[in-house]
Image: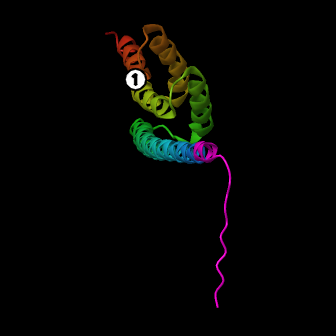
Amino acid sequence: MAKTIFVEIIGNASQFKKELTGAVAATEKANSGFHKMGKAAGIAGLALAGGLALGLEKSVHAAMSAQVATERMNTAFEHSHVSIKAFTGGIEKAEAAGRKLGFTNAETKTSLGSLVVATHSGTKALDLLSVAQDVARFKGTDLEAGTKTLTMAMAGS
């Protein structure tokens, strides 16, 4: 036979209710905090992914620009009958110096290509590159505009 046991709990029911309500509120607050944190993490993740995509796009664009500038410079040397191999070290030094002045390698190569066509000399082109950079910086323009100003002056315009 089953025996029945009666248990009588004597206590302050209002205090128990307050504690229970407080525990529920704390749980809801914690859940709300986790929900907000989850939202923030999701937004941060999207921002990070967007930043990476933008960075990759800029990197691809820069690589394509550098490739075009290199091919243009190589063609300029070839059409001016100047051996580019003889000036490889000078070109690398010019790129490094240009980067210190705020010019990209692509800008430096494009400028060198224009200067080689104008002078038909790799040595003169490398010497005039620093003048073109100074002109561009003085006028507050890009290196291409500084090079164009210099080549026009050399031609008497």
Q: Magenta residues, as a range?
A: 1-19
Residue 5 is a magenta residue:
yes
Place of residue 135 in the rendered image (x, y in percent of width and height, measured from the top left): 46, 12
Which residue occupies 66% across, 83% down?
3
The C terminus appears in which quarter of the rendering?
Answer: top left
Q: Answer with left or right where residue 147 lies relative to residue 11.
A: left
Which residue occupies 42% across, 20% down?
142
Q: How many marks?
A: 1
Determine which residue is flagged by label 1: 144
Which residue occupies 40% across, 23% down?
144
Q: Main secondary structure of the magenta part?
A: loop
Amino acid tagged 1: Glu
The N terminus appears in which quarter of the rendering?
Answer: bottom right
Residue 7 is a magenta residue:
yes
Q: Secondary structure at mark 1?
A: helix
Place of residue 124 in the rendered image (x, y in percent of width and height, measured from the top left): 52, 23
Q: Nearer the viewer, residue 32 or 10?
A: 10
Give above or below for 67 relative to 7: above
Give above or below for 145 relative to 91: above
Q: Nearer the viewer, residue 108 or 33?
A: 33
Residue furthest bottom as drawn: 1
Q: Answer with left or right where residue 91 lies relative to residue 154.
A: right
Q: Nearer the viewer, residue 126 or 140?
A: 140
Q: Answer with left or right where residue 156 lies relative to residue 137.
A: left
Place of residue 101 in the rendered image (x, y in percent of width and height, measured from the top left): 57, 20
Q: Nearer the viewer, residue 92 or 60?
A: 60
Residue 10 in which image quadrant: bottom right
